[in-house]
Amino acid sequence: MKGKEVFHLVHYGIIYALLTAGAVTFLVPLVWMFVTSLKAPAQIFTYPPEWIPNPVKWENYIQALTYFPFFRYLLNTLYITTLNVIGVVLSCSLVAYGITHIRWPGRDIIFILVISVLILPYIVTMIPLYLMYKKLGWIGSFKPLWVPSFFGVWAFHTFLLRQFFLSIPRELSDAAKIDGSSEFGIYSKIVLPLCKPALFAVVLFEFLWTWNDFLQPLVYLTDQSKYTLSLGLAFFQGTHDTAVNLLMAASTMITIPILILFFFAQRNFIEGVTLTGLKG
């Protein structure tokens, strides 16, 4: 074996070892959460820690469901998350298309202004938004949590799609215009079908952010029956802080949909994130 081949073998071996160590590091908390959810209360804080529960208490999941209205909070979260994903995909893709494929004066300046929103933390705009929604009578409803997504307000998603749209040859849209296609026809029949990887990335990002969002539901929701899973879990922790095994069971049930989504969409997600950096 030549020295160059040995170097590459060692190089890739080190990379895979580091990646494996990183994967194990991130998996340990998830495994510990699941293991703790199957323990009896007396086994949780034993030393040394027990990685295999004995006995395995699957009934912890049934008890966790009865301690707080899990399915009500699940439906609320799915409702908000679904509307946000639909709104973000429609509005941000339209904005990104307008910035990349339509020529109009001041286009680059508007794009810079859109991107500049990323430097503003949410805490800066939280009070003005709350006052605006209060005047609209939206406080206590789901509207502040999903209506803005239909107006292209998420600059990160717009930027992500814009980077992918730039990799689509302009000749395609020019040829469609010669054939008599409208801008919306080009957007819906040519651009969108070609940018599925980027759309998968946007869907996954938005799903994760909305599913795990705690601050906005805390600010705008006042009725406990409208709580999301993140708020419900915090409420559960505040009222049953000693039932750690039940808390871990509830946390596991909330985490499972995220793991399932990422497992099935990881290939498209990675492809979308990678391809959006091809052209600036």
Image: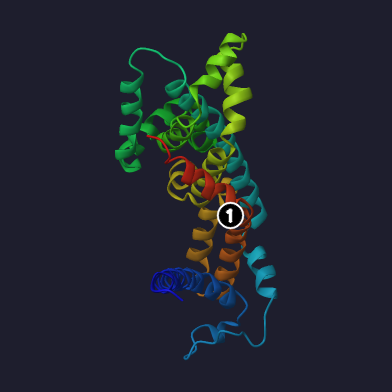
Q: Nearer the viewer, residue 64 or 93?
A: 93
Question: Quick one: which residue is furthest to the front in this view?
Answer: 2
Residue 232 occupies quadrant:
bottom right
Residue 238 position within the rendered picture, expressed as x and y whole percent measured from the top left: 48, 64
Residue 47 position within the rendered picture, expressed as x and y whole percent measured from the top left: 47, 91
**Does the rendering let one see residue 223?**
no
State which quarter of the image contains the C terminus: top left
Q: Report which residue position mark 1 lands on.
A: 262
Structure colour scheme: rainbow
Taking 232 as reference, is 129 above or below it?
above
Q: Nearer the viewer, residue 173 or 242?
A: 173
* Residue found at x 57% / y 53%: 266
Taking 7 as reference, is 199 above or below it?
above
* Left or right: 213, with 120 as reference point: right
**Does the rendering let one see residue 97?**
yes
Q: Nearer the viewer, residue 218 or 29?
A: 29
Q: Secondary structure at mark 1?
A: helix
Residue 135 position within the rendered picture, expressed as x and y whole percent measured from the top left: 42, 26
